[in-house]
Image (cartoon, rainbow, N blue to C red):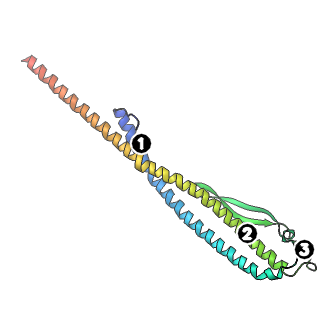
Amino acid sequence: MEKIKLSKNELKRQKDALKRYLRYLPTLQLKKQQLQFELRRIESLIAERVEELKAQVAELKRWLAVWGDDFELDQVIQIKEIREGQNNIAGIDVPVFKEVVFGETLYDLFWTPLWIDKAVQVFKILAILQAERKILERQTAILNEELRVTSQRINLFEKIKIPETRENIRLIQIFLGDQQIAQVVRGKIAKNKLLRRAK
């Protein structure tokens, strides 16, 4: 705890600081609630994507028996780019999934196996779901870090700054009150001395 000056100026400074803390604390608490809500929402989205991935893999397993041919799918499916944007959640910029851009999937229909069309479709869906899940996980990491920092700030205000400032105000008010009483007493003593001299 820092040494405070026991003066009226310091009292005003401490009262102003307390007002700031009390005004800023609800904003931080609201931000914490928003972050917690968004994290729950994103976690449910991740769970949905994982379930969709499992469903697509199960669909893929049905076709595995047909895929006995030696055919390289990477010749047909190529991810050129994963596009993402930015979204602001409670004052924090987080990445948002836009789309997966695939390269041209040109192949000779006469020379490729019949299952290629279905495989291309399923693998594109898998690539989109994986890309979206990874971006959602990045969002979670960013928001978790911001939630940690916000919680620390709330604790700082609630447990340290506000009680410390209130205690400083109390000490200054006691000191100034004592000073005022001492001045009144000194004034009365001086007045009594003057009255005795006048007699």
Dot 1: within a 10 Å radius of its alpha carbon, few (fewer than 14), some, or many (20 or more) residues? some
Identify the image quadrant of the C terminus: top left
57 or 124, nearer to the observer: 57
User: Regarding mark 1 in the picture, which secondary structure is present there?
Assistant: helix
Pick whichever of labels 2 and 1 is earlier in the sequence. Answer: 1
User: Regarding mark 2 in the picture, which secondary structure is present there?
Assistant: helix
Residue 22 appears anywhere in the view: no
- Image side of residue 74 versus residue 157, left or right: right
Q: In which quarter of the image is residue 182?
A: top left
Pick whichever of labels 3 and 2 is earlier in the sequence. Answer: 3
Identify the image quadrant of the N terminus: top left
User: Do callouts 1 and 3 mark residues in contact (Cβ within 8 Å)?
Assistant: no
Pick whichever of labels 1 and 3 is earlier in the sequence. Answer: 1
Please name the residue shown 49% across and 51% down the image.
152
Residue 168 appears anywhere in the view: yes
Q: Residue 107 carries which label?
A: 3
Residue 54, compared with residue 14, is above or below; it is: below
Q: Residue 128 carries which label?
A: 2
- Image side of residue 45 versus residue 11, left or right: right
Residue 188, compared with residue 39, is above or below; it is: above
The residue under label 2 is which amino acid type?
Answer: Ile
Q: Distance between the residues labelled 3 and 2?
A: 21 Å
Q: Residue 17 carries which label?
A: 1
Q: Distance between the residues labelled 1 and 3?
A: 70 Å
Percent coordinates x, y for residue 159 in the rendering: 41, 49
Q: In which quarter of the image is residue 180?
A: top left
Dot 2: within a 10 Å radius of its alpha carbon, few (fewer than 14), some, or many (20 or more) residues? many
Q: Distance between the residues labelled 2 and 1?
A: 50 Å
